[in-house]
Structure formats: structure tokens, C-alpha cells
Image (tube, rainbow, N blue to C red):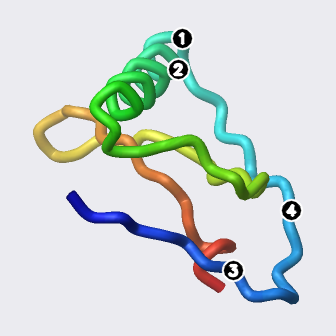
């Protein structure tokens, strides 16, 4: 198991992320995924109050994949 820590610089300014509208099914999928990952302890609650937008992209096989937008955080 790896312990990945996102360290931010002292001058990092928190800001609200862009909100992408999700369908009811997408919201349920996000909640289910997060709860599953928390139970398995693959992730844990963040101490950073920065939000990261989540949205879905449809691939060629017509399945939707969840994407997290880390652009602002990566800057």
C-alpha cells in the first residue's frame, strides 16, 4: 500500500472548484465509489479544504469514466 501525500506550497490559495452538473446516477456512482474506497482504506478524508471537480467522460465503448480535475491543484 502506498501513502500518497499532496503537499501544497505555503502561498497556495484555496478556491472553489468548478461545479459540473451530474445526473442522479452519476452522483450515486461517485458516492458509491468514494464510500467503497474509504472502506478499503485506499483513500482517506482530506485535511485540505480544497475541492476537486468530478465529471464523467464517455469513451468509444459507450461506458462513462469518472475524471477528477486536478488542474488547479497541480499548478
Q: Which label's residue is closer to the chain start, 2 or 3?
A: 3
Q: CA distance from mark 2 to mark 4?
A: 22 Å
Comparing 13 with 41, the one in front is: 41
Residue 41 occupies quadrant: top left
Q: Residue at x 55, y 72 (%)?
A: 6
> Element type at marker 1?
helix
User: Which quadrant of the structure image shows residue 74?
Assistant: bottom right
> On the rendered image, what quadrant is the C terminus found in?
bottom right
- Sequence-wise, the earlier of marks 1 and 3 is 3
Classed neighbour count for the residue bearing mark 1: other residues with Cα under 10 Å, few (<14), some (14–19), many (≥20): few
State whether residue 70 is above or below residue 37: below
Q: Tell me, for residue 8, which label it has, or none.
A: 3
Q: Nearer the viewer, mark 1 or mark 3?
A: 3
Q: Is residue 44 above or below residue 62?
A: below
Q: Which residue is mark 2?
A: 27
The first of marks 2 and 4 along the sequence is: 4
Label 4, residues with CA under 10 Å away: few <14, some 14-19, many ≥20: few
For the residues bearing labels 2 and 1, Cβ distance under 8 angstroms: yes
Q: Where does label 1 land, which residue?
A: 24
Q: Which residue corresponds to the image point at 54% horizontal and 18% vertical from the top-left? A: 23
The location of residue 69, given as percent across then percent down, is 55, 60
Q: Residue at x 27, y 64 (%)?
A: 2
Which mark sits nearer the N-terminus, 4 or 3?
Answer: 3
Task: Give percent across and percent down for residue 38.
Answer: 41, 32
Name the mark on residue 15: 4
Amino acid at each position: 500500500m502506498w501513502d500518497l501525500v499532496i503537499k501544497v506550497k505555503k502561498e497556495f490559495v484555496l478556491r472553489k472548484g468548478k461545479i459540473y452538473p451530474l445526473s442522479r446516477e452519476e452522483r450515486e456512482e461517485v458516492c458509491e465509489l468514494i464510500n467503497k474506497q474509504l472502506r478499503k482504506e485506499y483513500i482517506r478524508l482530506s485535511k485540505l479544504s480544497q475541492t476537486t471537480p468530478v465529471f464523467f467522460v464517455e469513451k468509444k465503448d459507450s461506458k462513462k469514466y469518472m475524471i477528477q480535475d486536478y488542474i488547479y491543484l497541480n499548478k
